[in-house]
Structures are given as C-alpha cells and as structure tokens.
Amino acid sequence: MKRLFGAHENKLDAKGRVSVPAAFRNVWKATPEMTLVLRPSLLDGCVEAWPLPDYAKFQAKVDALAETDPEHYALASVVYSQAAEVELDAQGRIMIPAHLAARAQLVDAVYFLGRGDHFHIWAPEAGRAFLAASCAAAPKIAFGAPAP
Amino acid sequence: MKRLFGAHENKLDAKGRVSVPAAFRNVWKATPEMTLVLRPSLLDGCVEAWPLPDYAKFQAKVDALAETDPEHYALASVVYSQAAEVELDAQGRIMIPAHLAARAQLVDAVYFLGRGDHFHIWAPEAGRAFLAASCAAAPKIAFGAPAP
DNA sequence: AAGGAACCCATGATTTCCCATAAAGTGGTG
DNA sequence: CACCACTTTATGGGAAATCATGGGTTCCTT
C-alpha cells in the first residue's frame, strides 16, 4: 500500500467540512468508497485519521481482551465510542464531528500531517509546533547525539 | 460486518420510546427486521444492546453447560431471564422495558455508546463520566504507561 | 372500560447531496 | 519560454432527503 506523506493546510468551512488533501486521497484512490476512522490521539492534542482497513489493528487489541475484563471496557471506549467513521463526499471532503474538533481546537483551518499508514489532524499552530519539536528531537534519537 | 461507533444522546419521550441513532441503524440496514437484545451490563450501571445474531455467543455459553450445573442456572438467568428482545418501530425507535430503565436510571434522555458489535445505553451524566474515565485509563493500558 | 402497546401521520431541524466557481496545477504548442 | 486550453483541487452555497420527536388513533388485554 502506498503511504501518506507531507504536511498540508486546508480550511474548515461553516458546516465543519474540510477537504482531505489530494495527496492523501490519491493514495487510496484504488478503493473509491474508502471510509476513514477519526479518533482522538492517545498521546497528543490532535485527531488521528485511519483508513478503515488499517484501523483493524486497534479493533484486534480490543477483541484480544476478555469481554468481562475492565481493560477491555476502557479500550473499547477509545477505539469505538470516541471514534467516528466518516466518508468523503463527492468533492473529497470529510466532516469532523464536534467533539473531535473541540478536542483538537480546530476552528477555521486544519493542518494535516502524513504519517505513513495514517495521518494527523491538528490546529495549524499546534501542528507546526509539534512538527518542529519532533524534528528537533529526531537527530538525537536517530544518531544518539544532536545534529551539529 | 460494519461496526458501531460514536456517542449519541437522544430523548426518551413520554411513552418511554427513544430513537436508536441513525448511525447505528445504518450498520444493520441490510437486515430490515433486526431485533435487538437488551440486558443489564455485568460490570456497570448501563444497559447493553446486542443485535440478535451477535447475542448467539452468549446463548452458546449457556447451552454448553449441563442443565444441572449451578453455573448454568446463573448464566441462564443473566442471558435469558434478565434480557429482553425489542424491535424498532417504523421511525427507528425502541421501548426500553421498565426493569432495565430503572436499573440504568434512565429518565428523560439516554446516551448511546457504540462499542463495535454492540452498544451501551446510559443515563447521560453517567455515560459521560464512564467515557471520560475509560479514556483517561486507556493510554496506560495501550502503552503500559500514562500519557505525558 | 381502562390501560398500555402498536401503528400512523406530522413537523422542525439537521444533515446529505448536488451544482457552481475560483484558484492552482498540467501539459502541449507555437 | 511565453501562451493557452484543459484538468484537478479547494471552497462556497442551495436544494433535497433524512432524522429525531411529538401526538393522535386503533387495537388488544385485563
């Protein structure tokens, strides 16, 4: 499967719609009716968007725990109750549900970050800050020492 | 099979009816006469709702035990005696039996939580509290450590 | 007869779908 | 390399369908 690259900023319109960057749509254009699953990031103040087939790995985590296990309960809440399935309209837009937009403080524009098999949806300023911080930390992580 | 996602709040009307969220109904719209099984949650103060075909796995558990086994008695009580089959009316509403509504303290509004193959029915405040608590616990479960 | 439950219809609000347009990119051609 | 025609992309807005909800009527049960 092709992978999701790059950073893109698009406008959120009055109805809460936003165009998914064409660079992302083209990755799964072989599946015309691709649905995305949106959910809050567990680590950051952003929304994660997963093509439904790739979301299966989270579902598998939930299914691996016994029905009566309290941990199963907690995971299912995040994987299902907090998530939303969304479809692209004919123009390639999605609607971001209010509770997710509020969590990521999305107001009038959003910032998409490709991350291989999924992508992030950030408020523009927060997304750029996250990207800058990650890039600053990366050399040390990759090479064990800061870049010169 | 498609899965049940998201959280939805609907009103309980004077006759005790409540609309099942369209997002859920559409998941099993291929089966026009879908029956739901309602039963008390074993862990929480909510009502669980299962599409009848998925409820079969609980029935199988009961049937696997010998008639004379005390566990058979206990399970059969939960799986059958406490549960209720309900059908959607032409507008997509269900009636929640009094003993289940009382148990979950459902009064004038209910909160639906999608959980993959079934959903929960909560009193709104209790449901939101449950969801918040689950999501707070989830990062630790998923990553073995709390989120920063 | 009374009570509740199933059924039917009505309606405002929301959401979905469809069309329009402007901007930006693409490629071809002289 | 400048210009033009064409395609794709991003965005806006209005029409149409769906949804959630309320209320009335009939029918069965007790």
Image (cartoon, coloured by chain):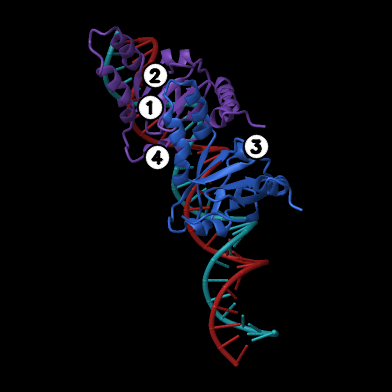
Chain colours: A blue, B purple, C red, D cyan
Q: Earlier in the sequence, mark 1 or mark 2?
A: 2
**Which is more foreground, mark 2 or mark 3?**
3
CA distance separating discs 1 and 3: 30 Å
Question: In this orientation, which residue lies closer to the viewer: A62 or D9?
Answer: A62
Mark 4 sits on what residue? B2
Q: For mark 3, does the 10 Å Cα neighbourhood hold few (<14), some (14 to 19), or many (20 or more) residues? A: some
User: Alpha carbon of mark 2 to alpha carbon of mark 3: how far?
Assistant: 33 Å
Q: Which residue is mark 3?
A: A103
Determine which residue is flagged by label 1: B50
Dot 3: chain letter: A
Mark yes or no: residue A2 visible.
Answer: yes
Dot 1, how many residues are within 10 Å of its Cα: few (below 14), some (14-19), or many (20+)? some
Q: Residue furthest left?
A: B67
Q: Position of residue D21 (x, y in %)?
A: 51, 29
Give yes or no for contact between labels 3 and 4 (Cβ–Cβ under 8 Å).
Answer: no
Q: Determine which residue is flagged by label 2.
A: B39
Spatial CA distance of label 1 from label 2 is 8 Å
Choose between A47 and C17: the one closer to the eye: A47
Which residue is located at x 51 percent, y 51 percent?
A88
Q: Residue A97, position in %: x, y?
A: 58, 40
Chain letter of disc 2?
B
Element at badge 2? strand
Disc 2 and disc 4: Cα gap in Å?
22 Å
Task: Tell me where residue B36 appears, x and y as whole percent.
Answer: 36, 27
Is circle 3 on the same chain as circle 4?
Answer: no
Precedes in sequence: disc 2 or disc 4 = 4
Near-viewer residue (C12 or C16) = C16
